[in-house]
């Protein structure tokens, strides 16, 4: 009979994915009190696990959104203190865009949607966007 896999543990060591398989062979024995043999095989795979990319969330400048509204958005949706929010507001105003934070894809998407919907509800054209870290 073929060995039966009864457990799998994956360890990450030196960026190498190592899998341990416990195989239990099911050999018939003449003595029913003997236990089945337990064999341990070490299998190394060449595939490496990689961390998912982070995304940068930023605000874009426009000529119509009041600066105080930008500060309010940064405080409400990005949990920034007033002084930091004011600095980022000035960066948005002077350079055309300001970085609000770096997040995983799902969190970044959620923040972009929340900010854009909040801006529309308050009749402001403020835009929030996201980009993959490392992208130009």
Image (cartoon, grey):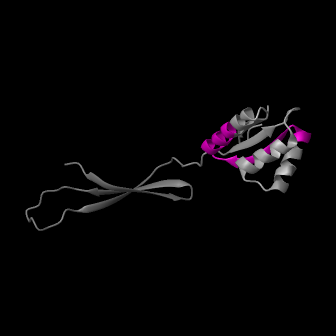
For the point 58% across and 48% down, the residue is: 50
For the point 54% across and 49% down, the residue is: 49
Image quadrant of residue 56? Answer: top right
Observer-nearest residue: 135 or 69?
69
For the point 77% across and 47% down, the residue is: 74
For the point 79% across and 56% down, the residue is: 81
Asked if residue 101 is among those painted magenta in the image, a careful observer would answer yes
In the image, 85: left or right of 106? right
Quadrant of the drawing holding the C terminus? top right
Q: Extreme right residue here?
A: 94
Where is residue 9 shown, x and y percent of the image? 41, 57
In the image, 119: left or right of 16? right
Q: Extreme front residue here?
A: 122
Where is residue 121 shown, x and y percent of the image? 72, 34
Residue range highlighted in magenta: 92-114
Where is residue 65 shown, x and y percent of the image? 84, 36
Image quadrant of residue 90? Answer: top right
In the image, 25: left or right of 21? left
Observer-nearest residue: 68 or 92?
68
In the image, 118: left or right of 40? right
Please name the predominant secondary structure of the magenta segment in the image.
Answer: helix
Image quadrant of residue 92? Answer: top right
Observer-nearest residue: 41 or 132?
132
Q: How many marks?
A: 0
Asked if residue 84 is among those painted magenta in the image, a careful observer would answer no
Where is residue 25 shown, x and y percent of the image? 22, 56
């Amino acid at each position: 009979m073929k060995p039966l896999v009864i457990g799998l543990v994956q360890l990450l060591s030196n960026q190498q994915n190592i899998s341990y398989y416990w195989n239990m062979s099911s050999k018939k024995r003449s003595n029913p009190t003997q236990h089945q043999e337990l064999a341990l095989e070490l299998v190394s795979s060449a595939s490496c696990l990689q961390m998912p990319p982070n995304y940068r969330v930023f605000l874009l400048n426009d000529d119509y959104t009041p600066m105080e509204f930008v500060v309010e958005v940064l405080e409400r949706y990005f949990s920034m203190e007033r002084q930091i929010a004011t600095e980022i507001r000035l960066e948005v105003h002077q350079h055309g865009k300001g970085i609000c934070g770096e997040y995983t894809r799902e969190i970044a998407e959620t923040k972009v949607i929340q900010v854009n919907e909040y801006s529309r509800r308050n009749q402001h054209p403020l835009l929030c966007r996201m980009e993959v870290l490392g992208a130009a």
